[in-house]
Image (cartoon, helix red, strand yellow):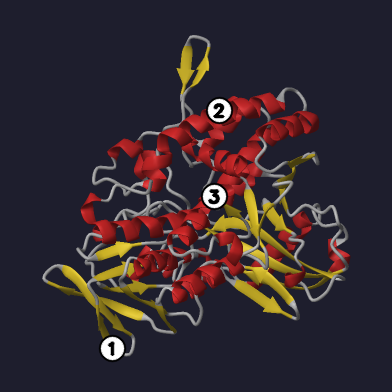
Amino acid sequence: MARIVVIGAGMGAMATAARLAVAGHRVTVYEQAETYGGAVGRFERDGFAFDTGPGLLHLPAVYRDLFVKTGREPLERCVELTQVDPASCHVFADGTAVSLPNASRAGIVSALDAALGGGAGARWGEFLNRARDAWDRSRRPLLEEPLPPDVKPFARDPYPAERTGPLRRRAATLADVGRRELRDPRLAALLESHALAYGFDPATAPASAAVLPYMEQTFGSWYVGGGMRALADAVHERCRERGVEFVLGARVTDVLVKDGRAVGVELDDRETVGADHVVAGAPLPALYRDEVLAWESTDEWPRHQHTVRTGRVTVCLALRGAREEDAAHRTVVHSADREDELDALARGRLCDRPTVVVLRPDDARLRPDADHEAVTVTATVAAGGVWASENLWNTVGGPAVEAFADRMVEAAAAAVPGLRERLMWRVVRTPADTFRETGVFQVPGPALAGARGALLPAANPAPLDGLYFAGGWAHPGGGLAHAGMSGALVAGLIVEGADFRGSR
């Protein structure tokens, strides 16, 4: 039985801890915050409750596998899990709206044809065929296996070239795919919204980001009853049932090294804790920037998604009045000025007309009574570099933040009837809140091939022997499902050693 210290209590870290405990190891988790869950947080006030991180779950099989492998009680006995239908509604810049059914390709094609006309559904279906090719080529090496030492093969984009007559043209970016293959600004906006939701700029994201809408529309979107925080509660409880010890409010200040190997950690009260293995579940940039891990120059940092410089602004809205029965759970209201939005992401400023995601869960546990409603509105924004002094959110003033939130709420009115009249109060959360809670302003995205390997996260085995990386900044990247996958990979590497070749 090995002694294992886990730094951080995010979803990837807890997924690792639960699997290692079941394998017979003694696991202790040290979390600097007073709670667990990492980015899967919650804000509560006056009987209203809001998810401050992910609002929906994709690829629920990841957490089903976690619960099966760590105990007899399956996921559905621990949380209430339901498919959202429609999966999403989209309101485009020209006022056109479409509702897309959950995990039904034929239904999606039909809905797009009916709403957009002109063979829009057929073009989207053809695009999904190419996206499926990219998914098939990259799924196992980018999700289910540890990254190999040589990642050069991942620098090539797996998204297939489009045949145009006797020639083939390869799209350089996701925006190229929308422009060349979809040939409708509304379909292009639909495509790009999936990249934005994961924090990628469509103008620079590789064409392989096409796997994001494919993944969602193939495997579906799921809601956890009581909000996504209920999933964090369930994973935490599973850890505790398997003997994992949690020490909250304990900040790790140093990873101890002896003979070139991690042998424990030091806490902020100077206490030292020995370990046979250390799992770092905290964001990798924060670990290096705060010198928890020793380094002399940034060249020594492991590869990570350094080109992702985006974060989230979330507005929590407390509304009077009942939610209408036919309201969509999720509505994407697309920007009326795409060029300005993308330019703002590239130049590190706030745009005038952001694309917003409006979540309106029909869940009595999130509101004081049936005559009120809790709504969240989220936008992807520029968040700058990993150094605090370089960050937009250290300089942007309160009036600018409130004005941007005003514009977000104005856009959300397209999805919520009578929003302005129903609003009781609101709370605005920005990348500055993310930094306060996690140590970074940015939200990492899932691993993507292409882009010369710039969107590959850190490998799970760290450069230091005995140290491993888990969570959104580690392979296979950000997102709730991907964080759970990182837990499976790290646990496999510790239990089975260098011979581990991935989940089966």
> In the rendered structure, are the residues bearing label 3 and label 2 in contact, judged by CB atoms less than 8 Å apart?
no
- Percent position (x, y) of residue 106? 69, 31
Considering every residue shown, the one lying at the far left of the view is 259
Helix, strand or loop at mark 2: helix
What's the amino acid at mark 3?
Leu
Helix, strand or loop at mark 1: loop
> In the rendered structure, are the residues bearing label 1 and label 3 in contact, judged by CB atoms less than 8 Å apart?
no
Residue at image mark 1: 271
Instruction: Name the residue nearer the viewer: 130 or 309.
Output: 130
Label 1 crowd (10 A; few <14 / some 14-19 / many >=20): few
How far is the residue under mark 3 from the one under mark 2? 19 Å
Question: Can you say which quadrant of the picture contains the N terminus?
Answer: bottom left
Going 55% across and 72% down the picture, which residue do you hit? Answer: 233
Helix, strand or loop at mark 3: loop
Residue 297 image-quadrant placement = bottom left
What's the amino acid at mark 1?
Glu
Residue mark closest to the camera, 1 vs 3: 3
Residue 91 image-quadrant placement = top right
Taking 17 as reference, is 164 above or below it?
above
Residue mark closest to the camera, 3 vs 2: 3
Residue at image mark 3: 59
Q: Is residue 45 left or right of residue 10?
A: right
- Percent position (x, y) of residue 303? 31, 53
Residue at image mark 2: 129
First in sequence, mark 2 or 1: give its number.
Answer: 2
